[in-house]
């Protein structure tokens, strides 16, 4: 009982300490149609607040993600390319919500690649459950296995909400997700690449029906049985588990036949509700398991 009371007092004191000027604890009113990627800076109950939402660190990360996507989509479906539809304020800045969860870091970290499922359940319980939105969570804590992970709508039952991508920062032990060409920097690096890879996942890439869709077999890795990847090493949707090829993942469906601006019946990011310009009959991520 004393132990529970102690942790409760620590959590309450942290909540009061989190109250800082310029910080938003809710999703601000939308300035668009509500279909957007909402960004959350989430901490575990015992997490240290690094103020990434207040120091433009997360905004810089999002800017680099969007800049890369725009560059890779120029002169494809649209001459000027497309942009990811991140949730923004009236002044055009990214709408970032702050959230301190009621779960400690160890409980989340030990879930590894599946930690995003626990995070999704918790942010939904705490009010971030808009059916129109996709959530990109910058988690200020650790993960025993990965630097980022996401839910895959096409591999989830229709009864399960799969709308969240997560970046674990600093991530694995000893800041390993920050080192090796990573971190919040004004450049497209491995941290940016991992975050974008997971956001694409939750937007529906790579669809099961894509000609070069890759499903990992039972090979004794954390990716066993997981689909949603592309079998092309140079593509950003190739497996992020290979350190040899990770930094070379710099293409966005260059053949235009798998998940961007293709001509088949599969989900197409170019026609997603979560990108702009948005086509007349946009698509939403679909669920692939009954």
Image (spheres, rainbow, N blue to C red):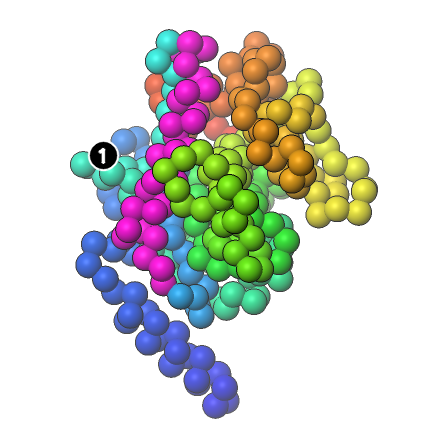
Residue under the point 61% across and 35% down? 246
Q: Is residue 68 magenta?
A: yes
Q: Position of residue 170 (x, y in %)?
A: 49, 55
Q: Residue furthest front?
A: 180
Residue under the point 19% across and 59% down? 21
Q: Quadrant of residue 92?
A: top left
In which quadrant of the rendered image does the C terminus lie? top right
Looking at the image, can residue 87 be seen? yes
Q: Is residue 147 above or below residue 200?
A: below
Instruction: Please state the extent of the stretch shown in magenta in the rendering.
Output: 49-78
Q: Quadrant of residue 134?
A: top left
Looking at the image, can residue 120 be seen? no
Q: Residue furthest bottom?
A: 2
Q: Position of residue 106 (x, y in %)?
A: 56, 67
Q: Is residue 97 above or below residue 210?
A: below
Q: Nearer the viewer, residue 243 or 99?
A: 243
Q: Residues within 10 Å of mark 1 (few under 14, many from 20)?
A: few
Q: Is residue 3 above or below residue 79?
A: below
Residue under the point 39% across and 30% down? 66
| SS state under label 1 | loop
Residue 172 located left or right of residue 209:
left
Q: Is residue 238 magenta?
A: no
Residue 1 located left or right of residue 95:
right
Please name the residue that numbered disc 1 is placed on.
92
Q: Position of residue 83 (x, y in %)?
A: 37, 25
């Amino acid at each position: 009982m004393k132990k529970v009371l102690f942790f409760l007092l620590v959590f309450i004191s942290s909540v009061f300490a989190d109250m800082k000027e310029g910080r938003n604890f809710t999703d601000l009113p939308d300035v668009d149609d509500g279909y957007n990627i909402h960004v959350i800076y989430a901490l575990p109950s015992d997490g240290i607040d690094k103020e990434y939402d207040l120091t433009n660190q997360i905004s810089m990360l999002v800017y680099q993600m969007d800049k890369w996507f725009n560059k890779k989509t120029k002169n494809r479906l649209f001459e000027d390319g497309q942009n990811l539809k991140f949730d923004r304020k009236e002044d055009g800045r990214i709408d970032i919500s702050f959230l301190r969860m009621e779960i400690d870091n160890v409980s989340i970290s030990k879930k590894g690649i599946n930690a995003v499922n626990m995070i999704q359940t918790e942010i939904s319980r705490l009010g971030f459950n808009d059916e129109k939105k996709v959530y990109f969570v910058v988690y200020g804590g650790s993960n025993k296995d990965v630097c980022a992970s996401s839910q895959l709508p096409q591999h989830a039952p229709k009864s399960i909400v799969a709308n969240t991508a997560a970046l674990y920062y600093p991530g694995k032990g000893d800041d390993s997700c920050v080192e090796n060409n990573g971190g919040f920097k004004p450049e497209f690096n491995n941290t940016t690449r991992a975050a974008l890879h997971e956001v694409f996942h939750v937007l529906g890439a790579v669809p099961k029906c894509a000609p070069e869709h890759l499903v990992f077999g039972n090979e004794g890795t954390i990716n066993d049985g997981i689909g949603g990847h592309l079998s092309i090493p140079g593509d950003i949707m190739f497996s992020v588990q290979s350190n040899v090829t990770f930094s070379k993942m710099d293409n966005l469906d260059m053949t235009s036949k798998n998940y961007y601006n293709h001509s088949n019946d599969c989900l197409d990011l170019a026609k997603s509700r979560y990108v702009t310009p948005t086509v007349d009959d946009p698509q939403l991520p679909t669920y692939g398991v009954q």
